[in-house]
Amino acid sequence: NAPTVGTGTWTLVSGTGTITTPSSNTSGVTALGYGANVFRWTISNGSCTSSSSEVTITRNQTPTVSNAGSNQTQCE
C-alpha cells in the first residue's frame, strides 16, 4: 500500500535479492536466490509507531532436462 502519511521502505529480511526501488510500494526485485526470500514493507512517520508487513517470494530451481536415452528395437 502507498503511504498516505509517512514514508515507506522495502528491506530484505532473509534470503537474497536486490530491491530496485526501496521507497516504492510497487518496487521490483532482481537477483533472487533459490528458496524463500522474505521482504518487509515498513511505513514510518517520525515518532509514531511504524507499520510493517512481510511477503515471501520463493524461487525454485528449474529441473534438469530428462533424457531416457535413444529409442531401441528388441526382437524376440
Image (tube, rainbow, N blue to C red):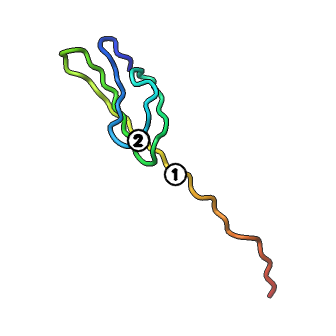
Image quarter (top left, top right, bottom left or bottom right) of the N terminus? top left
Q: What's the residue type where badge 2 is placed?
A: Thr
Residue tagged by mark 2?
Answer: 16
Say which of 63 and 22 sits in front: 22
Sooner in the amino-acid sequence: mark 1 or mark 2: 2
Question: For this view, does 19 lie left or right of residue 45?
Answer: right
39 w.r.t. 23: above or below: below
Name of the residue lying farthest toward the bottom: 76
Query: Mark 2 packing: few (<14 Cα in 10 Å), some, or many (20+)?
Result: some
68 w.r.t. 29: above or below: below
Say which of 75 and 63 sits in front: 63
Q: Are marks 1 and 2 in contact (CB under 8 Å)?
A: no
Q: What's the residue type where badge 1 is placed?
A: Gln
Query: Mark 1 packing: few (<14 Cα in 10 Å), some, or many (20+)?
Result: few
Real-space Cα separation, disc 1 to disc 2, in angstroms = 15 Å
What kind of element bears circle 2?
Answer: loop
Q: Which residue is drawn at the image coordinates 80% and 78% (left, top)?
A: 73
- Residue 58: where, in percent of width, then height? 44, 44
Question: For this view, does 76 lie left or right of residue 50?
Answer: right
Image quarter (top left, top right, bottom left or bottom right) of the C terminus? bottom right
Question: For this view, does 34 lie left or right of residue 47?
Answer: right
- Residue 36: where, in percent of width, then height? 40, 45
Q: Which residue is drawn at the image coordinates 18% and 15% (left, top)?
A: 47
Name of the residue lying farthest toward the top: 5
Q: Which residue is drawn at the image coordinates 34% and 11% (left, top)?
A: 4
Residue tagged by mark 1?
Answer: 61
What kind of element bears circle 1?
Answer: loop
Q: Which residue is drawn at the image coordinates 34% and 20% (left, top)?
A: 8
Camera-near label (1 vs 2) is 2
Count of numbered labels shown in the rendering: 2
